[in-house]
Amino acid sequence: MHSLLRRCSLATFLLASVTSIGHAQGLADLAQPMEGRSMRATSAHRTGPDGKFDPNGEFDPNSNWDNKNLEPGKTRVLMEADGPGVVTHLWMTFLGPQKHTWAKDGSANHQEMLLRIFYDGSDRPAVEAPVGDFFANCFGKRAEVISVPVVVEDADSYNCFWHMPFRKSIRIEVVNESKKPVSLLYYNIDWIKKDTIAEDVPYFYAQYKQEYPVKQGSDYVILDTKGKGHFVGTVLAVRSRSPSWFGEGDEKVYIDGEEKPSIWGTGTEDYFLSAWGLKTTSTPYFGTPYFDQWGIVGGHTAAYRWHVQDPWVFNKSIKVTMEHFGWMSPDENPDYKSTSWNERQDDYSSVAFWYQTGTPTFDARAPHAKERVLPSIERKVIHPTAMLDSLDHGHGLVRQQDINNYPEGHVFFKPESEGEGWIEIPFTVEKKEPLRLLVNATRAEDYGKYKATLDGVAIGGTMDFYNNEIDDWEYHLLDFWPEPGEHVLRMECVGRNHKSSGNYIGIESVRLRERRPRVIEMGHDKDKDWKEKPTLYN
Ligand SMILES: *[C@@H]1O[C@H](CO)[C@@H](O)[C@H](O)[C@H]1NC(C)=O
Ligand SMILES: *[C@@H]1O[C@H](CO)[C@@H](O)[C@H](O)[C@H]1NC(C)=O
Ligand SMILES: CC(=O)N[C@H]1CO[C@H](CO)[C@@H](O)[C@@H]1O
């Protein structure tokens, strides 16, 4: 393809490699003539004749006031320009949700901020995704991404190098859908003004969607559109709702209206170009920026896959889907066995990235931020900080500590000796139903190793609370149908990691997490006495 666009710009290896054939361009393009004129839309401070902020004013050499705040409910237009042109790079940064000297009550998180890009005066956005998810930062959690088209350095500078050609005009905006402001938003958007954009040059699209949980009996649809173009990327976020590994589902791609998919993969982790599962990683074309734990109920996995060197090309239409199959614990299987090929009921969200000509027919839209937050799956959260004075424990100091990781702090216990290292947390169960018992605890360099008992019965393995920096971790202990009434979880010190300088413990909460409704329907473990053989399905 010999469009003007292709001859002219820097990271054209992107468009070039996808629209022409075969080999990536890149550095070779720099030694070609380039047509156009570089432009920038920026948050850099400008002032009008009255010395006050004026977006169309002059850059102010005496000011470093280059960021903008965005009040709740407000939309900030980052760029509005007439074409033809092509956006070549976008960078933005803003404060995280935590309280900050410059944002005393905290700020919006990036799941609550919606990025929208409109071309040629259309009122339907061509790009619509939470700011975080667009940059492969899902669940509102910040994570570093180091890839070719997207770089989130140190989890706080949001860059993308996707090329976004436009003909008549472009508008790029960020909508605050939070109750809190977007604080200290800085941005620079680089683009090239051009004389023409060839007729066959496609537009760039990105669309977020979610299913909490995924629909039973049908594959999860990442994109379904008519037109001519190429699919260039997926961001997928999965919160598991069952024990065991979710990721056995295959990608299935239907091209140009075919009834059976002619592109069919081997498993979710394989689609994301890893093997034998996923782990936190970031590479030029694929990665898993967020992965908390293997096989737990309530685990979070966010992965990206950029089809930059290997776009899926379509002539009339494309439908990109993912099965939601995986391993399943015996108590969710009709025949009470653990098997690898079951339809699971996890929570999925995704962003599809593609180029196409013609009008896309994908009708998914991003729901409001209130619906993007994953629903809580905690039946009960017991905060020991709320019962500080009545907790039974061995000799030693017990107190509440406010630490960054938790909004409600944790209970810190510093036993006088290893033998005194025990603390008991009572809780009440109202209803007999299948639940998972877990502890959300702090890890630190002077913390010990503990084991748990419930009502005197040993459950779970040894929990090593040592870590060279302070963080939090979920320790899953038991799947059971507890009898209604009082229960006591006891944590007992059993030594310390050789690297630890103490045997302390910090507990944020004890949690009873719900299971999928079919665990109740099947009722396999309903009449089982969990005390005889305490089980944790994984
Ligand atoms: C693409 O579509 C055009 C127009 O419908 C058709 O002429 C052409 O053969 C198609 N190419 C392929 C490879 O399917
Ligand atoms: C522990 O609890 C805090 C506060 O609710 C939460 O933000 C954090 O994600 C939990 N940690 C884990 C590992 O789940
Ligand atoms: C656009 C939008 O949904 N804005 C929300 C931002 O926050 C305010 C205050 O909570 C809401 O009222 C708005 O709906």
Image (cartoon, rainbow, N blue to C red):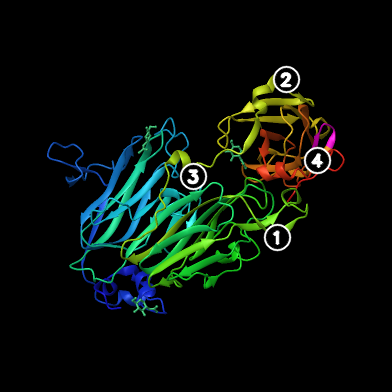
What residue did someone put label 1 on?
340
Residue 147 appears in the rendering: no
Dot 3 or dot 4: first in sequence order is 3
Residue located at (63% from left, 47% from top): 241
Residue located at (43% from left, 30% from top): 105
| In this picture, residue 285 sits left or right of residue 538 | left
Q: Is mark 4 within 8 Å of ligand 2?
A: no
Q: Mark 1 or mark 2, which is nearer to you?
A: 1
| In this picture, residue 8 sits left or right of residue 229 | left
Task: Give how far apart the Cα atoms at labels 1 and 2 are.
Answer: 45 Å
- Give the overall secondary structure of the magenta segment: strand
What residue did someone put label 3 on?
140
Q: Residue farthest to the left? A: 49
Q: Which residues are magenta?
A: 451-457
Amino acid at pointer 1: Ser
Secondary structure under badge 3? loop
Mark 2, Cα crowd under 10 Å, few <14 / some 14-19 / many 20+, is few
Residue located at (76% from left, 37% from top): 481
Residue 459 circle label: 4
Dot 4 or dot 2: first in sequence order is 2
Dot 2 or dot 3: first in sequence order is 3
What residue did someone put label 2 on?
390
Say which quarter of the image contains residue 424.
top right
Q: CB atoms at circles 3 and 4 under 8 Å apart?
A: no
Dot 3 or dot 1: first in sequence order is 3
* Figure quarter occupied by ligand 3: top left
Q: Mark 2 or mark 3, which is nearer to you?
A: 3
Amino acid at pointer 3: Gly
